[in-house]
């Protein structure tokens, strides 16, 4: 079911946000070792009862932690312009965006600093605790990336403009475009709202009669130095994503059926999508599902054999 974010506070920049296009995040593709592999290495290191085992355990935990942080930032457009930031500053970005509580991660990072900079030896009990915490952190961040809304229908409070917000993860950019298209008026808790009707077809194209202005009303880069500028703009999108966890079951409406799909893409296809997002100044990160065929196709060899 389509999710809607309604602003509680009139000081918020958006009147509402409604999901239009979402994807399962925008994962890192330039890594040779996965987070899961680092955690497997850490678990094996933990089996070594020596001090070396404890130190190596924490080292692999650190690598897994850093990669999950980068993956989370990438999914929300916060890595493209902040890739070279220190780890503590990357944690600040997560906090600014409202993605996750950082108290546990700061504790783990402090433990890692004791090992790497003060040359302390962690106890095995502490190393095991750190491994358990990072496993939980991995599960939590995966949930945050199950659905990331890269295009949202929106009402801009400043001048009541209806449009779309585009989150571009490859460029680290947040933009708002005015939309010309049909809308409807609804009431919720004694308040009246003007909502855009859905603007996308199944294949990602625009509905007939809908136009998006080619130039954005505003554009904000998602950098560390200007985080105060984009905080109030990105947080509602994070909140909208938080409403939807997991794959929904089918929902029957008055005139349609909403279904969820999960598609496995080859790595080359993911790279192609990233390149398209980087090169597109307008539009949105959509995949064309229009040519999908459901069911089973007969094996040609068997079909020929049956005819003979």
Image: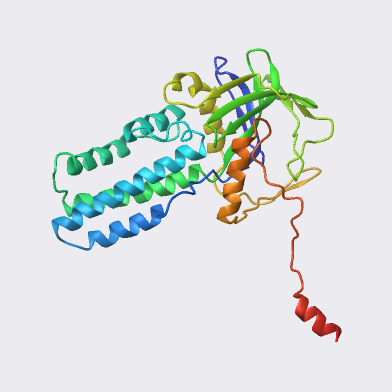
Horizontal arrangement in the rendering, residue 297 relative to residue 89 (left or right): right
Horizontal arrangement in the rendering, residue 15 relative to residue 304 (left or right): left
Residue drawn at the location 52% of the way across and 31% of the way down: 172
Residue 28: % across, % down: 48, 46
Q: Residue furthest bottom?
A: 308
Residue 231: % across, % down: 48, 23
Looking at the picture, tell me which residue is in the foreground, 5 or 261: 261
How many numbered marks does the figure carry?
0
Q: Is residue 241 above or below residue 294?
A: above
Horizontal arrangement in the rendering, residue 125 relative to residue 10 (left or right): left
Horizontal arrangement in the rendering, residue 35 relative to residue 14 (left or right): left
Q: Residue furthest top?
A: 159
Q: Is residue 161 above or below residue 143?
A: above
Q: Please, which colouring scheme is shown?
A: rainbow
Residue 161: % across, % down: 70, 18
Residue 188 visible in the current orientation? no
Quarter of the figure that contains the N terminus: top right
Residue 118 visible in the current orientation? yes
Quarter of the figure that contains the C terminus: bottom right
Residue 134: % across, % down: 34, 48
Q: Is residue 15 above or below residue 95?
A: above
Quarter holding residue 255: top right
Residue drawn at the location 66% of the way across and 36% of the way down: 284
Looking at the picture, tell me which residue is in the foreground, 306 or 159: 306
């Amino acid at each position: 079911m389509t999710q809607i974010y309604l602003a509680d506070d009139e000081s918020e920049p958006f009147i509402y946000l409604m999901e239009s296009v979402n994807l399962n995040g925008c994962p890192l593709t330039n890594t040779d070792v996965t987070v899961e592999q680092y955690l497997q290495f850490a678990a094996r290191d933990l089996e070594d009862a020596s001090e070396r085992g404890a130190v190596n355990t924490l080292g692999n935990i650190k690598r897994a932690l850093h990669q999950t942080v980068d993956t989370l930032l990438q999914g929300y457009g916060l890595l493209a312009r902040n890739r070279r930031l220190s780890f503590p500053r990357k944690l600040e970005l997560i906090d600014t965006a409202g993605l996750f509580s950082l108290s546990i991660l700061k504790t783990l990072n402090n433990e890692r600093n004791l090992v790497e900079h003060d040359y302390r030896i962690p106890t095995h009990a502490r190393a095991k605790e750190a491994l358990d915490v990072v496993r939980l952190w991995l599960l939590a961040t995966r949930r945050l990336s199950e659905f990331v809304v890269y295009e949202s229908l929106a009402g801009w409070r400043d001048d009541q403009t209806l449009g779309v917000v585009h989150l571009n993860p490859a460029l680290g950019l947040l933009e708002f475009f005015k939309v010309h298209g049909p809308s409807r008026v609804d009431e919720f808790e004694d308040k009246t709202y003007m909502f855009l009707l859905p603007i996308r077809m199944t294949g990602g194209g625009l509905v007939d009669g809908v136009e998006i202005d080619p130039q954005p009303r505003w554009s904000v880069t998602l950098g560390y130095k200007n985080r105060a500028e984009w905080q109030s703009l990105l947080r509602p999108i994070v909140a909208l994503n938080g409403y939807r966890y997991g794959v929904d079951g089918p929902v029957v409406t008055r005139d349609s059926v909403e279904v969820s799909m999960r598609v496995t893409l080859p790595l080359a296809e993911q790279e192609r999508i990233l390149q398209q997002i980087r090169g597109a100044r307008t539009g949105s990160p959509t995949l064309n599902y229009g040519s999908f065929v459901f069911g089973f196709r007969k094996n040609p060899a068997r079909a020929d054999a049956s005819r003979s």
